[in-house]
Image (tube, grey):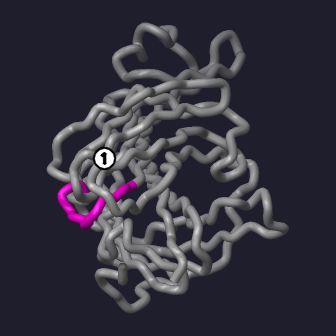
């Protein structure tokens, strides 16, 4: 399979360290490109320090949505959550590209009670119930997070690649299951359906446990939200972008933090 489209490089990729202490949430499919039309994959889901290592806590599957190549919702099979990771299977019974996504919309708050700093996370409707009336130094932030990965069985299609127009989203110019080492892939980042300009995107390759140096780079979106990545090696990659603005839809929150992360597999050239 050859790259579907080749774009000129739109942003300079720089080697920048991603904090070793940062917790990273991810979905890791057992494979992303399969040749048959009746295949299965298994998926790990976790939050960890080491990329794709199970050593911190599982990613909850409450908000998991699997979308089939025709746009219909598909139930995950055999979901399970353990000490360090969640797992589930997906039956790829139709040819085309599937999207696996965990989307969350919640709020976090910090405040003082009797001089002691308190922190809280939950749903917006529980704010008034769980936080004392008259709490001092109350700061509320709306948190929108979208985690995704893509899998193709047989011939790829683009039905699941269409954005929802909500939050931060990746619009693939290069198909996400058509990535090869030494080649350049292009994407567009959107916020609420509009180009997300001048946003830094962090890119890291898995398997860091077995390397003496991390394999990390970053790119910055242009005025149209476009950016490009040249893949140095085959492997599983994780990309993340985050925006903080004042466009919260929760009346108590003056700030909104919007995060997008995706796992992509890059095959040998």
The quarter of the rendered structure image containing the N terminus is bottom left
Question: Is residue 83 shown left or right of residue 10?
Answer: right
Q: Residue at x 54, y 78 (%)?
A: 268
Q: Residue at x 50, y 46 (%)?
A: 27
User: In this figure, which residue is indicated by the disc labeled 1?
Assistant: 92
- Where is residue 76 shown, x and y percent of the image? 35, 33
Q: Residue at x 56, y 21 (%)?
A: 120
Helix, strand or loop at label 1? It is: strand
Is 38 drawn above or below residue 3 in the view shown? Answer: above
Question: Is residue 47 shown left or right of residue 147?
Answer: right
Q: How many numbered marks have been drawn onto this rendered protein structure?
A: 1
Q: Residue at x 67, y 72 (%)?
A: 16
* Magenta region includes residue 161: no
- Where is residue 127 shown, x and y percent of the image? 42, 17
Q: Who is closer to the viewer here, 111 or 194?
A: 194
Is residue 225 visible from the viewing direction of this image? no
Is residue 210 visible from the viewing direction of this image? yes
Is 91 drawn above or below residue 18 in the view shown? Answer: above
């Amino acid at each position: 399979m050859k790259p579907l489209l080749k774009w000129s490089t739109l942003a300079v990729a720089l080697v920048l360290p991603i904090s070793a202490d940062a917790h990273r949430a991810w979905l890791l499919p057992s494979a992303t490109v399969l040749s048959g039309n009746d295949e299965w994959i298994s998926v790990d889901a976790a939050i960890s320090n080491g990329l794709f290592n199970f050593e911190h806590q599982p990613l909850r599957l409450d908000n998991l949505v699997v979308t089939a190549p025709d746009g219909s919702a598909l139930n995950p099979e055999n979901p399970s959550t353990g000490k360090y990771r969640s797992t589930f299977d997906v039956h790829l019974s139709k040819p085309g590209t599937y999207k696996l996504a965990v989307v969350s919309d919640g709020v976090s708050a910090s405040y003082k009670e009797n001089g002691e700093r308190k922190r809280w996370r939950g749903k917006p409707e529980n704010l008034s119930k769980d936080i004392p009336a008259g709490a001092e130094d109350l700061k509320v932030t709306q948190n929108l997070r979208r985690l995704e990965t893509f899998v193709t069985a047989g011939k790829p299609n683009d039905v699941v690649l269409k954005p929802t127009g909500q939050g931060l989203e990746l619009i693939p110019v290069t198909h996400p299951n058509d990535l090869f080492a030494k080649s350049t892939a292009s994407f567009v980042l959107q916020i609420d359906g509009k180009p997300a300009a001048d946003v830094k995107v962090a890119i890291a390759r898995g398997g860091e446990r077995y390397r003496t140096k991390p394999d990390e780079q970053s790119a910055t979106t242009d005025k149209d939200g476009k950016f490009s990545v040249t893949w140095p090696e085959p492997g599983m990659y994780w990309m993340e972008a985050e925006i903080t603005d004042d466009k919260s839809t929760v009346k108590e929150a003056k700030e909104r933090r919007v995060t997008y992360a995706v796992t992509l597999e890059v095959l040998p050239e």
